[in-house]
Amino acid sequence: MKTAKTISIVELLSKFSTEHKSIKWLEKIRWDKEPVCPHCGGIENVAKYKSKKHTYWHKDCRKAFTVKTNTIMHSSKIPTQKWVVAIYYMLTARKGISSLQLSKELGITQKSSWFMLQRIRQACQQGSFKLSNVVEVDETYIGGKEANKHTHKKLNVGRGAVGKIAVFGMKERDGKVKAMVISRTNKQTLQGKIHSNIQPQSTVVTDDFRGYLGLSGFNHHTVNHSAKEYVNGMAHTNGIESVWAVLKRGYNGTFHNISTKHLQRYVDEFVFRLNEGNCQIDTRDRMVSLFKGIGNNRISYQKLISS
């Protein structure tokens, strides 16, 4: 088996030592050979600006653009090199990197690094592919314990999942992961997600939660967790539970608190790291994979902070 090639931060900074090198690398990933106008999609009649570095003019739609136009880096004053380093840190930190830590690494404000990280997470959005073969399915809850909250923040309606956010996940054996924030964990919601994200007739393994009862269209196997049964022949949910373990280590050890509004982006980050950014893939390939998702993912600061 081929050993994945890792890149140290020293090697990374050497390769992307200037803004010019960083932008040219980004142009190669996004456009390959010829610049494509992000305003209209045209590739003909595109010319370089002589007075503005790395800027192009499309004669057909009469608009200027750069490789960062309409991407997560749109209108950013932060150098491209720092964007490259930020993505490197996000991909190589198994439990994620906090905006405070990143601000120290890049020499920018915590507010700017938080905005950067949220935009990078935007590029980590999960695709519309479907899982197949043997797929493990489970749900988990993200949030602080009621007992640990200040009195005025306690809901006083029970324990366990009270006050937490539900996340639903599916993991293909020896394959990819899909996960999403859900508002309810009832039968209609859970089975609807299974049908829309897993190929029909696949083998689906769940625990004995009542939301999975009567699942049709699949080869359904269960493990009876309530009776302390965790493996039943080929049936177990250890794979998807290991995904939850990593997600919760990030929540508890790195981020400490994630709002409901932004949780899906954090989930997308962890899923991307497991699918495309895991340590079995060359670091450079992992970065290319993420950079390919930067287009048409522009998001404003106002949209991020709006209620």
Image (cartoon, rainbow, N blue to C red):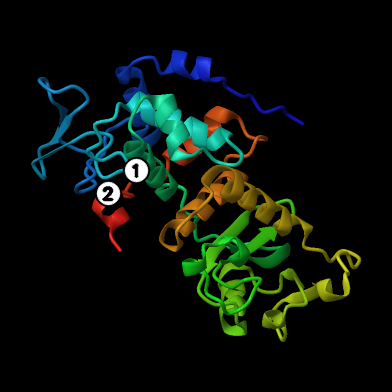
Q: Residue at x 71, y 63 (%)?
A: 135
* Residue under the image location 10 percent in, 20 percent down: 51
Question: In the rendered image, which quarter contains the N terminus?
Answer: top right
Observer-nearest of 216 and 107: 107
Q: Quadrant of residue 306?
A: bottom left
Residue 160 is situated, as x and y percent measured from the top left of the image, at 66, 71
Circle 2: residue type: Tyr
Residue labelled with disc 2:
301
Residue 294 visible here: no
The amino acid type found where label 1 is placed reads: Phe
Q: Residue placed at 82% from the left, 75% from the top? A: 226
Which quadrant of the view contains residue 66?
top left
The C terminus sits in image quarter: bottom left
Dividing the picture into quadrants, the one containing residue 82 is: top left
State the mark number for residue 115: 1
Q: Residue furthest front?
A: 151
Q: Residue furthest right?
A: 233
Question: Judging from the image, what secondary structure is the residue with disc 1 in?
Answer: helix
Pointer 2 local density, CA inside 10 Å: few below 14, some 14–19, many at least 20:
few
- Is 95 or 205 nearer to us in this picture? 95
- Residue at left 32%, top 25%? 23
Q: Give the camera-side residue of 16 and 38.
A: 16
Asked if residue 202 lies left or right of residue 179, the reply is right
**Residue 240 percent across, percent down from the top left:** 70, 58
As drawn, 295 above or below 177: above
3D distance between C-alphas at marks 1 and 2? 7 Å
